[in-house]
Structure formats: structure tokens, C-alpha cells
Image: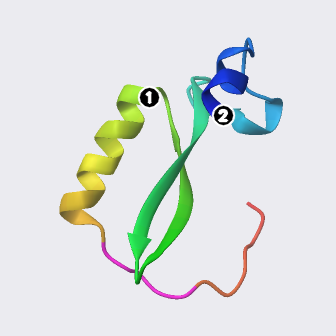
């Protein structure tokens, strides 16, 4: 059902598209992983499906935990 709904749309909703400093479009992608018998999800921004796959591959090799986040400051 998810694929049918996604394929029937012309483009992602505005909240799922942004632009970088060079005015290139970035799209939001969902990532899923399993841990302790449960499925978890997170998201990344990438320029395309291929770029998202390359980012996931890089994460497999280099991802580390930097620390707990406590807040966010607007730039």
C-alpha cells in the first residue's frame, strides 16, 4: 500500500524537501534498523535515492555516537 500511494504522487510534500546553500534540492529519506527484536527508524536528508544509499553505506563504515542532544539553537 505504501508503494502504491507513493507512486501515485507527483512530488513529496513541501516539508520533505529543502535546499542547501548552493540551492540544490535535498529530500528526506527514512532509514530502518532492527535492534533487540524491534524495528527502529530515523531519517536523513539526501540529494537523491542514490545519494541516500551512498550515505547509508558510509554510515555502515564510519558512524559513531557523538553524545546526547539537549537542545537546539536557531542559527
In this rendering, the answer to whether 53 lies above or below 64 is above
Disc 2 vs disc 1: Cβ atoms closer than 8 Å?
A: no
> Can you say which quadrant of the picture contains the C terminus?
bottom right
Q: Where is residue 64 in the image (x, y as percent from the top left)?
A: 31, 75
Can you see residue 20? no
Q: Which of marks 2 and 1 is nearer the N terminus?
A: 2
Q: Which mark is residue 2?
A: 2
Dot 2 crowding, Cα within 10 Å, few <14, some 14–19, many 20+: few
Dot 2 falls on a residue whose secondary structure is helix
Residue 37, position in %: x, y? Answer: 42, 79
Q: Which label sits on residue 73?
A: none
Vertical arrangement, residue 11 with respect to residue 29, above or below? above
The residue stretch that appears in magenta: 64-68
58 left or right of 19? Answer: left
Q: Is residue 35 visible?
A: yes
> Which percent across, then down, holds residue 70?
67, 87
Task: Estimate how packed mark 1 is, as few (under 14), some (14 to 19) or many (20 or more) residues with alpha carbons within 10 Å.
Answer: few
Quarter of the view holding residue 65: bottom left
SS class, disc 1: helix
**Image check: 17 left or right of 20?**
right
Residue nearest the observer in this picture, 58 or 66? 58
- Horizontal and vertical percent for residue 41? 55, 62
Q: Quadrant of residue 49?
A: top left
Q: Name the residue under label 1.
A: 49
Query: Which residue shows up at 46% across the image and 87% down it?
Result: 67
Q: Depth-wise, is mark 2 or mark 1 nearer the camera?
A: 2
Amino acid at each position: 500500500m505504501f508503494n502504491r500511494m507513493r507512486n501515485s504522487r507527483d512530488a513529496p510534500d513541501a516539508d520533505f524537501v529543502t535546499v542547501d546553500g548552493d540551492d540544490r534540492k535535498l529530500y528526506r529519506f527514512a532509514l530502518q534498523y532492527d535492534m533487540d527484536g524491534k524495528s527502529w527508524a530515523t531519517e536523513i536528508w539526501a540529494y537523491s535515492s542514490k545519494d541516500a544509499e551512498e550515505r547509508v553505506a558510509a554510515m555502515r563504515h564510519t558512524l559513531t555516537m557523538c553524545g546526547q542532544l539537549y537542545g537546539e539553537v536557531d542559527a
